[in-house]
Image (cartoon, coloured by chain):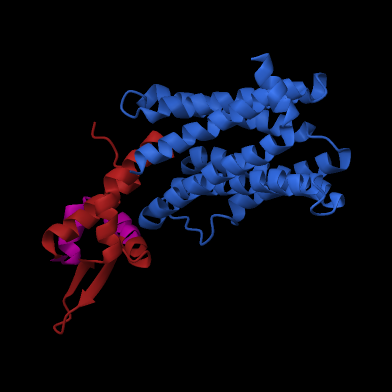
Chain colours: A red, B blue
Amino acid sequence: MVKKRERLEVIRDILNAIRENREIKPTRLLYASNLSPQMFKEYIDELIKKDFIMLKSSEDEKKTFLLTKKGFDFLQQYKVIENFVQNFGL
Amino acid sequence: MEQFYSWVIGNKDIIKIFYGLVIGLICFFIVARTDRLFRISFHKGIRYFRNAFLFYGIAFIVRYVFGALCLYNLIPRNYYPPASLIFEFFLIMAGFFLFYSLIWKKIEAVKEDYTSSLLNSKILIFYVMAIVISFIDYIWQSYYLLFISQIILFIFASAISYNNYRKNGSKHKFLKFYFTAMILALFAWILNAVVALYFEWNKGLLTDVYILNILFFILFLYGVVKLTK
């Protein structure tokens, strides 16, 4: 059985998918995140609220997600955060 | 060894100030390091862990620095009992925060998002308990409820951290030290209670409590420094 991803891992995967593509359409990000649409929306809302990602609308009304500086910082520090949380059982 | 204890007892006021300052500084260092991690990750566990050491830091600074200022007559002596009340309140809250950082995942839903980790509906219960315990102890002029609450708390915290160590100890080495820290804290509280109840605050035995406490904070300092490099 595949192990359920931790919340931090899901966030890392979403942010990584955006970073790898520089900017990414919502549908492609939904596939890349491997989440249900409902869970995906919850995570995306949270990441926008916490200023990790932003939603850009182009002139032809196409929407794409971009990574913010906070999002980059999170990815850079991810290993430290993950290690800390697991070692302290938080 | 006997000389060491006599020296400690002979210089107890100075040592108390130093002890409070050292623990206070350790705590504020841990708070600074973990706050940085929290601001990047918004991880609730890190947030509650940080709060625990913020409250420990405040408790020790209040108890020893404020207490020592009273003892040296730098501020009126009648400030000392309230300082003791504040110390007890912050100490109990710190224990609750540390314990809650271990169990929050089982209590809070992923969607629950508080604007404040210092005051929300879950934490409010701890505040009420801490206020009641510290106030009753203050009226009784004792630390009995503090001892009982902290011994129970650290029995549970030891069990949880042992379970974490058993499950993931081979992958995450600090879990072993975390469990050790919980056992040290549990022993420190038991010893503190025994010294207070049966040995009339024997200074020599109290020194052992201080040593156990310092070891507890040094273990956490070691973990935080090592894991946030």
Q: Is residue A82 above or below residue A60?
A: above
Residue B38 on the magenta segment: no
Q: Residue A20: image x %, image y %?
A: 13, 57
Most foreground residue, A81 or B10: B10
Q: Residue at x 85, y 53 (%)?
A: B76
Quarter residue B111 falls in: bottom left
- Majority secondary structure of the magenta segment? helix
The reply, left or right, for residue B186 in relation to residue A30 is right
Question: Would you place residue B170 above or below residue A49 in this image?
Answer: above
Region rendered in magenta:
A23-43
Relative vertical location of residue A38 with respect to residue B109 in this rendering, above or below: below
Q: The N terminus of chain B is located in which quarter? A: top right
* Image coords of residue A50 (percent x, y): 37, 64
Determine the residue positioned at 75% across, 24% down.
B203
Question: How many labels, in total?
Answer: 0
**Who is closer to the viewer here, A30 or B130?**
B130
Q: Residue at x 32, y 23 (%)?
A: B170
* Residue placed most toward the observer, B8 or A66: B8
Q: Position of residue B217 (x, y in %)?
A: 53, 35
Residue A34 falls within the magenta-colored stretch: yes
The answer to whether residue B170 of the structure is visible from this angle is yes
- Could you say which is closer to the camera, residue A63 or residue B83? B83
- Residue A62 in the image, given as x and y percentages of width and height: 16, 76
The residue drawn where x is 52% and y is 42% is B26
In the picture provided, is B40 more to the left or to the right than A12? right
